[in-house]
Every structure is written in structure tokens, then in C-alpha cells.
Image (spheres, helix red, strand yellow):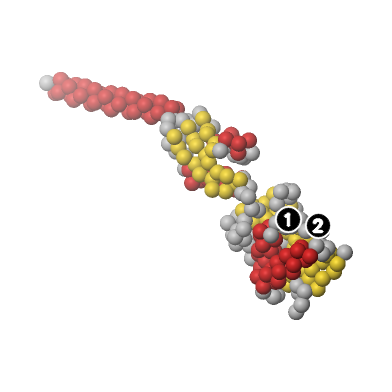
Amino acid sequence: MLFKSYGKKLLVVVRNGSIILGGAVLVFYLLFRLETLVRIQKIEVIPDEISRDLIGIVSLYRRSLLFLHTDEVVKDLSQKNPLYENISVTKKYPNTLQISGKKRTQIYQLHFSQGVILIDPKGIIIGRRSEASSLFPQIYYYQEIDVTRLSPGQLLPISEVIDAMVSIDRFRKLGIIVERVDIQSIGVLVLRVGQFDVFFSTQKNIGQQLQDFETVYLQFKLQGSNFSRLDFRFDKPVVEFK
């Protein structure tokens, strides 16, 4: 009797264990199949024309949508593609990832010995590149820049560069394309347009100097006067004619 009772209990344990094991195997199989189904097979980039330039897309294929953290993907793509802004990532089950963004229209390039620092109109660092682009204004600083202390997302701590960007933007609104800006020394800002150079002092109110420049420039333009240099560092503008 004791043997029979023990045998029945063992049979129940084995049967229950088999059920649990079978259930675990089934759950594991279903999870495996589900994880396989939600691996990224397709990536949609909006608008489509930016897909040719966007870096970092290929590595996203075959990753699982279930375990993909979109905020981390956005951060990675933003760091790898500083020329783009407003990057967003959306999961579209079962196996599609949608990425959207747009090219920046205003970028300023601050040169240093190994390349350029890319800055947005608010003075925020958005990345670095080994080579400058001819599409965006060039800014040259008179001292070497310690880039190890600068990182994306940080406000650039150089006030002369901020003044240079403000000046470039003001010139742009007047239809004047600035080729480059030389920050030659403390307080000296030189905007090179091609036909003429404009000197400002960063130790004076840059907004007032820009207003004075606009007044003088529009007056000379109306008169048809050709000048090679305008200097607003002093009490009165200094003009050199061609």
C-alpha cells in the first residue's frame, strides 16, 4: 500500500512537471516566434530624399522592435548626423521603423586645428566634422580651441562667436552673403563679404553697430558708391572707397 501511494504521488508530480515544462517550452517558442516577427525588416525615412545621407540606418535592421529604445536611437542618429534636426523615430508593428527629420538650413562652422565645430543659430554645439562645408558660413577664431571641453548640446562659451553669428544673420536678411568671419583678436570682428570687409568691435553693443552698418550700407547702395571697407569700431564709421 505504501508503495502504491508513493507511486501515485510520483506519477502526479511527473505529470504536473511535464505540464509545466510543456507550458514553459510553448511560451518560450511563442516568444521566440514573436520576437522573430518583430525584427526590423523595413525602415521608412521621411522625407525620402534624406535617406541617402542619413548615417546609422543600416545597423538598425534585424533589431527587435520590442526591445528597441527609440530615445536612444534618436540620440545616436542626432550625434551621427549633425546636419539634420528634429529627428524622430516611431515603431510600426510588426516590423517597420519610421524615421523622420529635416536638414538644417542654418549652421555656423567654427574652425579649429582638426576640423570644424558645428553650431546652431542659438549657439548650441551640434557636432564636429573633419572638413568644412562650403554651404555654411566659416568662422575663424584667433586662439586654438580646446574641443575636449566642448560637447554636443552645450552652449558655446565664446561670446565673440555668438556676435559673429548674429552679424551673419543680420547680413543675410539684407541679402548679403558672408563668406567668412575672422575674429582676429580680443574685440575685433571682421566680416568678409567678397566685395568689401566690415569691422565690428565685440566690446561695443553689436546690435547698435549692425544698425549703423545697415543705415550706411543702404545709403551707399542707393547712391551707387563702391567701398572696400567699413569700420564701426570707433565713434564714427570709417569708410574706405575703391
Distance, label 1 to label 2, CA atoms, is 9 Å
- Horizontal and vertical percent position of residue 52: 63, 35
- Horizontal and vertical percent position of residue 176: 72, 57
> Which quarter of the figure is the C terminus placed in?
bottom right
Q: Secondary structure at mark 2?
A: loop
Q: Quadrant of residue 173?
A: bottom right
Residue occupied by mark 2: 194
Q: Mark 1, residues whose alpha carbon is within 10 Å: few (<14), some, or many (≥20)?
A: some
Residue type at the position of mark 1:
Ile
The residue lying furthest to the right in this view is 242
Residue at (45, 37) in percent of width and height:
91
- Horizontal and vertical percent position of residue 191: 76, 63
Q: Mark 2, residues whose alpha carbon is within 10 Å: few (<14), some, or many (≥20)?
A: few
Residue at (54, 48) in percent of width and height:
86
The residue lying furthest to the front in this view is 223
Kindly check if marks 1 and 2 are in contact, taking CB atoms under 8 A apart as contact.
Answer: yes
> Which quarter of the figure is the N terminus placed in?
top left
Residue type at the position of mark 2:
Gly
Residue occupied by mark 1: 177
Q: Nearer the viewer, residue 186 or 70?
A: 186
